[in-house]
Amino acid sequence: MMDTENLIKVLDEQSFFTGLSPEQMVVLASTAAEVDYSGGVEVFEEGGRADAAYLILEGAVALELHVTNRAHHIVQTLHESEVLGWGWLFPPHRWSFSARTLEPTKVVRFDAIQLRAAWESDCELGYEMMKRFAQVMTGRLAATRLQLVDFYGDTH
């Protein structure tokens, strides 16, 4: 288990957090903990309560979409230094995908309630982080669109 000082060092090495002030890094690290997962573990389930954001430090995580009468469909695979999860940002705070580790995986897990409270009390931090998460969401939605076109085929 990392202490806040070591978490700050880890976060400071990640491009997602580049440009944040030392004070903002302390706030973010205070909402976080390091978590280790074995391979094949469900991190969260589509439709479940979204209560965290994750930064992948090591390993790989598959974002999966449940398709009726079919197995889960992998939409995207995420790796080291990628952010996982945004369902916690907006009510009703539910996951849009499932996430499953493909191998032993180490993450930093940010508590969603604490993050939202921190962002509410520091609007500059909240705005900066929302811009960063919006970029992640845009990229993931584009990847999902391509996967669905590939999965279902061109309808025209």
Image (cartoon, rainbow, N blue to C red):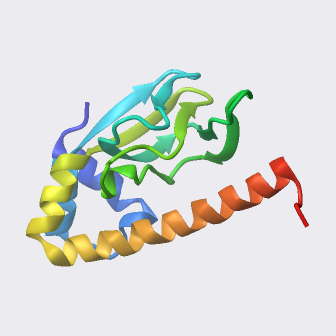
Pick whichever, 97 or 139, lies toward us: 97
Pick whichever, 133 or 71, lies toward us: 71
> Where does the C terminus fall, quadrant-wise?
bottom right
Please provide percent x and percent y for residue 32.
24, 44
Q: Say left or right for 152 vs 5.
A: right
Q: Residue at x 38, y 75 (%)?
A: 131
Pick whichever, 95 or 117, lies toward us: 95
What is the total number of numbered labels drawn onto the structure image?
0
Q: Residue at x 18, y 67 (%)?
A: 24
Is residue 5 in view? no
Q: Residue at x 21, y 51 (%)?
A: 29
Above or below residue 37? Residue 79 is: below
Q: Say left or right for 9 vs 82.
A: left
> Where does the N terminus fall, quadrant-wise?
top left
Q: Say left or right for 70 vs 80.
A: right
Q: Say left or right for 76 vs 33.
A: right
Please provide percent x and percent y for residue 136.
50, 64
Q: Residue at x 25, y 48 (%)?
A: 112
Above or below residue 125? Residue 86 is: above
Please provide percent x and percent y for residue 153.
88, 54
Res 11 → quadrant = bottom left
Please provide percent x and percent y for residue 91.
30, 54
Is residue 14 in view? yes
